[in-house]
Amino acid sequence: MLREIVRRLVATIPVMGVVAIAVFALLHVTPGDPAVIIAGDYATGEDIARVRTKLGLDKPFLTQVGIWLGGIARGDLGASIYSGLPVTTLIKQRAEATISLTLLAMLISIAVGVPVGVLAAWRRGSWLDRSVMIFAVSGFSMPTFWLGFVLVYVFAISAHWLPVQGFQSIERGLWPFLRHLILPAITLSVVYMALIARMTRASMLGVLGEDYIRTAFAKGLAPRRVLVRHALKNASLPVVTVIGIGFALLIGGAVVTESVFALPGLGRLTVDAIVRRDYPVIQGVILIVSGVYVLINLVVDVLYVVLDPRIKY
Amino acid sequence: MASSVPSVNTELAVPVIAERLSRGGRLRRFSRRNPTLMLGAAVMALIVISGVSAPVWWTGDPLAMRPAERLQAPSAAHWFGSDNFGRDVYTRTLYGTRVSLVVGAAVALASLVVGTSLGLVIGFHRRLDAVMMRVMDGLMAIPAILLALALMALMKGSVRNVIIALVIPEIPRVIRVVRASVLSLREHTMVEGARALGARTPRILVRYVLPALMAPLIVQATYICASAILFEAYLSFLGAGTPPHIPSWGNIMAEGKTYVQLAFWIILFPGVFLALTVLAVNLIGDGLRETLDVRG
């Protein structure tokens, strides 16, 4: 098993290499001189020249790629053009809000999505099943930021139960932290929850038709035990896959959710960087986020082996 | 998706009965059997009509500012209220439909055409395939919205550039679907037969492989369309999409962001339209998937 994990880990290296080069190449595939674009509309020739030297755009392309990859290997993602701070520092400052938001949203989605999907499959065709399916389709079509505003309007502006926006670090206590995070996390979780519920239902329906499920019910096991131990365990592979792949949705949603709730996270960092054309920051955030995505899917691959011993790489 | 060989349509097995039904009867029967598809199509038809013929539906000038009428609640004069420049939100929302529909359709079509052509070639070249799939894995690891945002940061805000920024992240995803089907079709007897008759690769791709790919691709296109409509709104909402002088649901809501407490209607109505449109496209996708019997 350890050997398989190491093998998978090694296999992610070329993927990350492609990500790193793609993120770098972005700057060069778009039309126009990147130095001119980054320097902005009111830049003088001097500004443009400064940007060009600072980003190393005056060097040959392959040298630039080499410098970029070498920096990544040393954990150096360059410095922000706007503030001059190292990109890694900026990312560390903003990581807490984004990690808290996505983790909480992920927890909510799994905690609701999986049981709801199991119940819908068990009571196929019932009103419960139908409402779960309606929720799954409409939740998946929901514009995240709009849902955020509706929740803010209902729970914060009209009812005054929760704060409108802002973020409190967990160091200030668990309750203030959760109070500020609950609406954004629910907002963000809806799309992901819909996806998980739908996949759980579909996968469970496939398993519930099997003979061993009939046997388990026939020998008088409690439905709960049959559903969880016999059915869900065998239906869990596609669910785990969708949790891994759907993480990309969560990241995309986090960017807009942070903007709605004024959370100081990576999404806000990116959006601010885009307005300022602070390209090193944009590249750094994309690289880190994609790396996390690859890692999560690596964990999913390893989970396969745990969930289904028949799988061998 | 691995074995998407054209399936046998059971309805065609009884052509005599099908012939006897009148045209209207056939449509009724079709919609009874495909309620999801018909519901999606009906909602979509309403949205397309309202967007295409926006000037007809008692709208005004979407850009006309009336400072005296700013931030008014929904009323007989302003059905969806007015924004902070006194512009009519109903008019702007209806005109905003156009941007969403154009972006959704263009992104779906362009990513399908480019992705399919590349996917066919890559799937048929064993050596190219091994390298390109590693590259595709890498490109797909970059979350689509971040990639689109980064591309928009380097381009001027325009509808055309939004389309480009949304097509690029979709292409590797289409390539993967096409390539997976091509791999299984490559070994199919009909391809073997065509080869035995002396058909060359381009002919096999166009005459044998492409038609078998149509069903999964059409379904894929509807999902791309739905997510493109959402992403256009996200980009415009974040200020990196459709420029302010063209009303789009995303930028109407972006301008309403500051007035959530005072004038919630600026966000509410365009959002309802956006959610309904995406829902309709997704329903069409789900319906088509059932009707065309596409797995995956």
Image: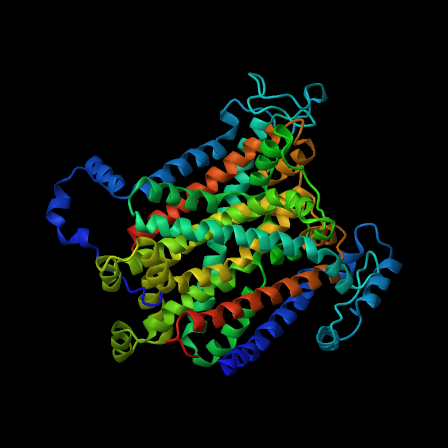
The chosen color scheme is: rainbow
Is B60 positioned to the left or the right of A125 in the image? Answer: right
Q: Position of residue B121 (x, y in %)?
A: 44, 72
Which residue is nearer to you in this view: A262 or B42? Answer: A262
**In this view, which residue lies farthest toward the left?**
B16
What residue sits 22% from the left and 60% below the top? A219
Q: Position of residue A160 (x, y in %)?
A: 64, 31
Query: Residue A83 at x, y = what percent?
Result: 83, 57
For the C terminus of chain B, give its image quadrant: bottom left
Q: How many marks?
A: 0
- For the N terminus of chain B, which image quadrant? bottom left
Name the residue: 28% across, 58% down.
Answer: A221
Is A161 or B120 nearer to us in this picture? Answer: A161
Could you tell me which residue is drawn at 25 percent across and 76 percent down? B193
Give the vertical position of A81 relative to A61 (above or below). Answer: above
User: Extreme bottom residue here?
Assistant: A3
From this view, report whether residue A284 is shown above or below residue A268.
below
Q: For this rendering, which residue is in front, A238 or B163? A: A238
- Give the image location of residue B168, x and y in percent: 56, 59
Residue B116 seen: yes
Asked if A48 appears above or below B36 in the picture, the reply is below
Q: Residue at x 71, y 18 (%)?
A: B68
Q: Residue furthest top?
A: B76
Q: Is B106 on the left or on the right of B19, as rendered?
A: right
Q: Image check: A15 left or right of A30?
A: left
What is the quadrant of residue A58 in the picture? bottom right
State left or right for residue B284 relative to residue B190: right
Res A86 → quadrant? bottom right
Q: Is residue B241 visible?
A: no
> Residue A149's image quarter?
top right
Q: Find the residue positioned furthest to the right.
A: A46
Return the residue nearer the eye: B111 or B56. Answer: B111
